[in-house]
Image: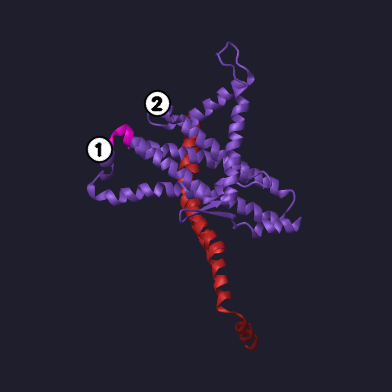
Chain colours: A red, B purple
Amino acid sequence: MQDAQAVAAGISGADIAEAAKYIAAGLCMGIGAIGSAIGEGIAAAHALDGMARQPEMQGALLRTMVLGQAITETTGIYSLLIAIVLLFVI
Amino acid sequence: MFEQLAGLLTHLGEKQIAVVSVGGFEIRFDIMALAMSWVVIFLLILLALVLRRGLRKPVEEKPTRTQAALDSLVGLLRGQLSDNFASERLATMMFPFISTLFLYVLFSNWLGVVPYMMSPTQDLNVTFGLALLVFFVSHVLAIRLNGPRRYFKGFLEPYAFMLPINLVGEIAKPLSHAFRLFGNILAGTILITVIMVKFAPVIVPPFLQIFFGLFFGGIQAFVFAILAVAYINVAVEG
């Protein structure tokens, strides 16, 4: 009990804010990456289906897949930017 | 050596800013991004001048090696990027712009692999400038090709009360275009620097550079160019 109090006395509000910053950045990146990862996986899976069915369409499918994945990735990039802002700017 | 590497990490977010005041206004320049942009521009011009020597002016029976290589390269760029335009006329007209954009972004991304150099595209101002360029090109082209009447009518479709949503959609395009390139390149740089400083200063970084620098840089340059194609296409045809 006494130890806990001693430790608590040494922790200031700034320390808590610092810790919260890192936790928030980790959570932001971890949760934010889920959606774009699932979306890109779905896009790749269906493009692969199409390629297996029609190998001669491979070039066009690949191009469209990369474009779709790049757009899907945007939400992940936004969460990355917020994580960077949390870590380096705030 | 380790002190130098640690310096890389602590100076990651810092910028050297030159402030020029012109008539009461402060204009700020990021020296590093500016210098690296000029390096890319000079590299591209130098490459063009050197490769031009391999070309023979009249088209002869047997092309030189350089000519054959350049032919297939230009054909590749044309086929992969510019042929995604809806009309043949637009594809021919925009091919120099789109391929220049692609080459500039590609070389910018790859410059980050060279020691003591930095990708200009890891600076938000550079990518935002490129995205704004695409934005203005697409809208000016839409007005010139379709006429102002049809252009402004496009904002009222499908219904007039959709105007705010259409406007927000137009503004969001260059924003996401710029942030995508910037975020990807900056994330690669931060990842490589952190792993290099904190975990493995030898052997591992070159492989990371190949993956994040060369491979992702190429993919992102392609995506940037093909999104520019899509935006111009939508503005003109949609």
Q: The N terminus of chain B appears in which quarter of the rendering?
A: bottom right
Q: Nearer the viewer, residue A77 or B7?
A: B7
Q: Is residue B226 above or below residue B195?
A: above
* Circle nearer the viewer, 1 or 2: 1
Which image quadrant is residue B11 in? bottom right
The chain ID associated with circle 1 is B
Badge 1 density bin: few <14, some 14–19, many ≥20, Cα 10 Å:
few
- Helix, strand or loop for disc 1: helix
Q: Residue at x 51, y 61 (%)?
A: A28
Q: Residue at x 27, y 49 (%)?
A: B163
* Mark carried by residue B149: 1
Q: Taking B115 as reference, is A61 left or right? A: left
Q: Which residue is mark 2?
A: B88
Q: Is residue B122 magenta?
A: no
Kindly give the residue lying farthest to the top in the view shown. B61
Residues at marks 1 and 2 touching, judged by CB atoms closer than 8 Å: no
Q: Amino acid at mark 1?
A: Arg
Q: Amino acid at mark 2?
A: Glu
Q: Is residue B12 above or below residue B106?
A: below
Kindly give the residue lying farthest to the left in the view shown. B160
- Helix, strand or loop for disc 2: helix
Which image quadrant is residue B71 in? top right
Q: Residue at x 56, y 16 (%)?
A: B57
- Looking at the rendering, the stretch of residues picked out in magenta corresponds to B143-147
Q: Is residue B95 visible?
A: yes
Kindly give the residue lying farthest to the front in the view shown. B23
How far from the left and from the top, in percent, is residue A34?
A: 50, 55
How far from the left and from the top, in percent, is residue B199?
A: 71, 57
